[in-house]
Image (cartoon, grey):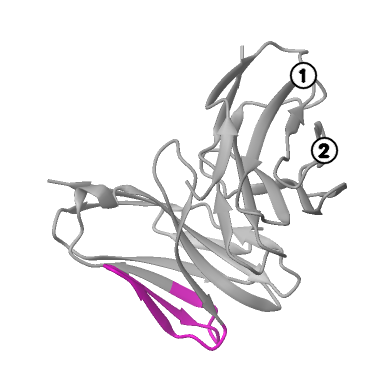
Amino acid sequence: DGGITQSPKYLFRKEGQNVTLSCEQNLNHDAMYWYRQDPGQGLRLIYYSQIVNDFQKGDIAEGYSVSREKKESFPLTVTSAQKNPTAFYLCASSIGPANTEAFFGQGTRLTVV
Amino acid sequence: KNQVEQSPQSLIILEGKNCTLQCNYTVSPFSNLRWYKQDTGRGPVSLTIMTFSENTKSNGRYTATLDADTKQSSLHITASQLSDSASYICVVSDSWGKLQFGAGTQVVVTP
């Protein structure tokens, strides 16, 4: 599992609700990332953070928010503004910039009901 | 247009047989190329990572090749096992560290 823990594994959300996905790593990595995975598509970057208290939007940040108050934690909030939130969400971390090896968590499957 | 294209989209092979997966990319400037294995419902796990100067790299029964001139890579699985059933994802990093993911090749190994 590479020392990255995502929770919960499965999450159900009613339309109009915000939900927060947890990602914790004990690898002492500076950089952390959130990706979204949809069937038949490659992973797409939502947000990334290269250092505590700093984060940047990825390719599909609309409808999502993050925080990086601690080095080991990078929670992702899926807001009601995200129109199609049902997907598999993956968190990753790396020692430094994305040129270095990235380790992934086990993922959270979010379903809107 | 996706900058990383993988083929085939899926394949079925008999246990014990070999197979080769393909990855073509247009990412530029190129930094490195990685192959990941992703079991259903789980996170990807790294198999190999290759830089511009590396042509081939092995990890057990997995052998990856890279031709940076033609921007092609392949992943060869030797003597497949049932546990090789998974999605194999090609990921290319540019010089600024941005990762581009292929859609993956779904491999099913049957007894």
Q: Which residues are magenta?
A: B52-73
Question: Which of the chains bears the disc numbered 1?
Answer: A
Q: Residue at x 66, y 62 (%)?
A: A95
Q: Residue at x 60, y 53 (%)?
A: A27
Q: Is residue B63 left or right of residue B26?
A: left
Mark 1 to mark 2 CA distance (whole Å): 15 Å
Earlier in the chain: of badge 1 and badge 2, it is 1
Q: Residue at x 21, y 65 (%)?
A: B18
Q: Nearer the viewer, mark 1 or mark 2?
A: 2
Q: Which mark is residue B28?
A: none
Question: Which of the chains bears the disc numbered 2?
Answer: A
B6 up-or-down from B82: above or below: below
For the residue pair A76 and B78, the one nearer the viewer reads as: A76
Which residue is under mark 1? A18
Which residue is under mark 2? A67
Q: Is residue A27 left or right of residue A48?
A: left
Crowd tier of the residue under label 2, counting other residues whose Cα lies within 10 Å: few below 14, some 14–19, many 20 or above: some
